[in-house]
Image (spheres, helix red, strand yellow):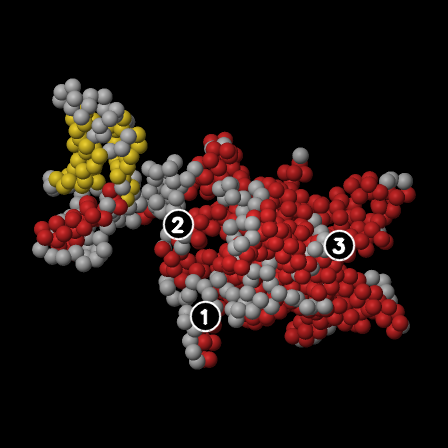
Amino acid sequence: MSSIKQFFRTLFIYRSALIGLMIILILVGLSIYTMFTIPYDEATKLWRAGERYWLDNPRNAMPSWVNLFSTKKMPETIVLDSRKPQPGVSKALIPVSDRITRIKVEFSFNYEYDDFPSELNLFFNSSFNTSPPQLTIHWVKPNGEDIVLKSLLVAKGEDRYYISNDEKLARELKNAISKKINGTIEYDIPLTTLLFASEDSSILNPSTVKVMKGTYRLWIDGIAFEASVNLDAKLVVYGKVYGWAGTDHLRRDLGIALLWGTPIALSFGVIASISIAMIQMFIGAVSAWFGGKVDSLMQRITEVFMVLPFLPILIMISTFYKFNIWVLLIVVIALSVFGGSVKNYRAMFLQIKEFPYIEAARAYGSSNLRILTHYLIPKVLPTIIPSIVLSVADFVFLEAALAILGLGDPLAPTWGKIINDAYSNGALYKGLYYWVLEPSIMLAVTSLSFAMLGFALDKIFNPKLREI
Amino acid sequence: MIPKLAIYVVKRGIILLLTVVIATYMTIIVANMGGYVDEIIKSDLYLSISQNIRQNPAYKALNETQIRWLINATYTNELKKIGFDKPFIYRSVLYLRDALTLSLGRALFISSDSGSKSVRIIILERLPNTILLFTTTQLLLFFIGLFAGLFLARRYGSLLDRLSVLFAPLSSMPGWFYGIFLILLFASFLRLLPYGGMVDVPPPTDKFSYALSVLKHMILPVMSWLVAYVPINVYVRRTFFLMFSSEDYVELAKAKGLPESLIQRKYILRPTLPPIITDFSLTLIGSWMGAIITETIFNWPGIGSLFYMASVMFDSPVLVGLVVIYAYLLALTVFALEFIYAILDPRIRAGGM
């Protein structure tokens, strides 16, 4: 016990080791938290659910905390649903006669942001027997002006009206506003801007156009020619920020992948580095101890593997089999066990082999296996701990690299996967930096923490380094 | 004395050649997915033959059974013609013979920019690009590491030295990873440098501005590797030299009052030269393989991205070609190094190793 205490005292002389270890502990804590709050099956389901599940999220939204650093407040998403009573939502079905029902659904919300929403959608859920309700959708700006957005017959069951995609409406509104302010809007103005902008000369230029702040109202006036009709509606005013991590091109919450990336990256990196180092060390020990034919066979196999290109073979195998991350881990280990480090371990064991205590062990007649596992390997084990810790980062990045090439586990939400999505959707061209930066920072923090700990351990376990 | 050396050299030569043969054969097996690629080729062939025959007006009069028979007969003939009637194991030996004699054959799916299907041309077209980028980078890395290492070893404990120790963990992140950040900063945010590629589109016509354009495209990839690997290179070399400068014979030289530069050249650099040269030549050879992810991220048309393309498309002749060339180069380098050391090192000369 005291020797462990002693070890940590020595370790923490190096401040970097303390910082590294603390970050690793935080990451482990985060992993455990993630595994308990979002079970893996649920996480993959959420991640693979497709756009239907995430329909209430904005597309490519930045994380919410960007608002803390900017005087310009970006809009959050506003969801108003007539099935969920809340202030600003009202719904009424008024039987006019036994054959006619009037429907009135009204949403009102306060919009105090400095930027325009990214999209505007209206979802319906209706039930009726034969006659579909006829709806007229009105939009009331804070200045009190009422615009009819559209009249439509709603379909049975689920139906939707993608307001911000209505190009006809956009043309009409553009002309109406142009006429009102005696100018022409020259640029390609999105409908969301037309619906939320102050109607003065500032709208003529995309750099000056500003939001008309205040209370907006969307109300639906409907009529149905039967009594047993029901209609529910949901208005989604999509913002430009979402959650603590933002969303991607499929409206998915990046937070899920960022959280789940942690346990996956940690376990992949740690399992790969420990098992590869152990197996390589064992092969090195066997090679050095038995010598002769066993030795030269092991060395020839190692040389063959040194010639074989590791990454291309891994890419080929993963393209071919498209397997999940744990099989990938096994393949990585299998391809690495005869890596170049076997030669280093063998050289170490060749020196130790000649030590007197090994001779003593041989003299009392201990078996080869006993010498290997009780005398040779324990002697080398401490000296390889630093390199195990240091190589964790390599394998974390290997997994990320495969994902970036599009060859990772197709189901698992990982950091490399986010970078891959961001890259293939041109995040860097479009200036969606958060999309690339968030997973990259996680990768960087993880690898740096292991590296800082590893370098400090190196100085402790390799006394030759400590002297200098 | 000489026969002993000769026996050693011949023995090593044979062992290295065998290594190349086995590695190449393994690549052939892996690159063909143990024969699976054959199935792709066979089904492609069958499909194209049956389409040709069914669309041929000359065979309109034939009924379904006759057409089936005709397709099968043509297919069997074609298989025989390309040698596919023999089992894969038999052909893999033929492939091995071709690969080892460097008759690299024709690619299955990939073609060169000039439209050629010859594996040799495809590889030769991309090799200069990779050498330009990665050999430059490796040379820079090597010399920066060497000189900064020597410099810092002499100033052990100074601020710069402590900084080099502090920054070493930065190398735990690979070059391509820094590449993403550099693209974000210099291409996307500041719009100073191109996102990737090797030359402007359309390429400049005169040689000078062409070279300038290539140079401009090289800045980010080279920089990303320098940022990623200079810290560790400097740290490793510094530590390496420090270890040697605490050897007894160096202490003695210092005690004798020899000038610092002489000590560094004769007492530190010279005895450490063999491992440094080995390291240097192996990284140079390795740099010819390019870097798959860096080339993909920077869209650099080199060997690395060819490797990637070939592995994803199962273009086994290209893969085998790349591996066999690399294996030969590596084996030759190792052989040359061992030969030189065998002559120089009395321990090896005596046959101890």
State the residue in front, A307 or B178: A307
* Separation of marks 1 and 2 at Cα, in angstroms: 29 Å
Element at label 3 = helix
Chain to which the residue tagged by mark 2 belongs: A
Q: Which residue is mark 1?
A: B199
Q: Which residue is mark 2?
A: A434
**Residue B35: where, in percent of width, then height?**
67, 52
Q: Is residue A45 left or right of residue B325?
A: left
Question: Does the image show residue A363?
Answer: yes
Residue density around tag 3, few if under 14, some if 14–19, many if 20 or more, within 10 Å: some
Q: Residue at x 58, y 59 (%)?
A: B310
State the residue in front, A330 or B144: A330
State the residue in front, B133 or B21: B21
Residue density around tag 2, few if under 14, some if 14–19, many if 20 or more, within 10 Å: many
Chain to which the residue tagged by mark 3 belongs: A
Same subunit, labels 1 and 2: the answer reads no
* Separation of marks 2 and 3 at Cα, in angstroms: 45 Å
Report the residue that reaches farthest toward the front.
Answer: B61
Q: Is residue B188 above or below residue A86?
A: below
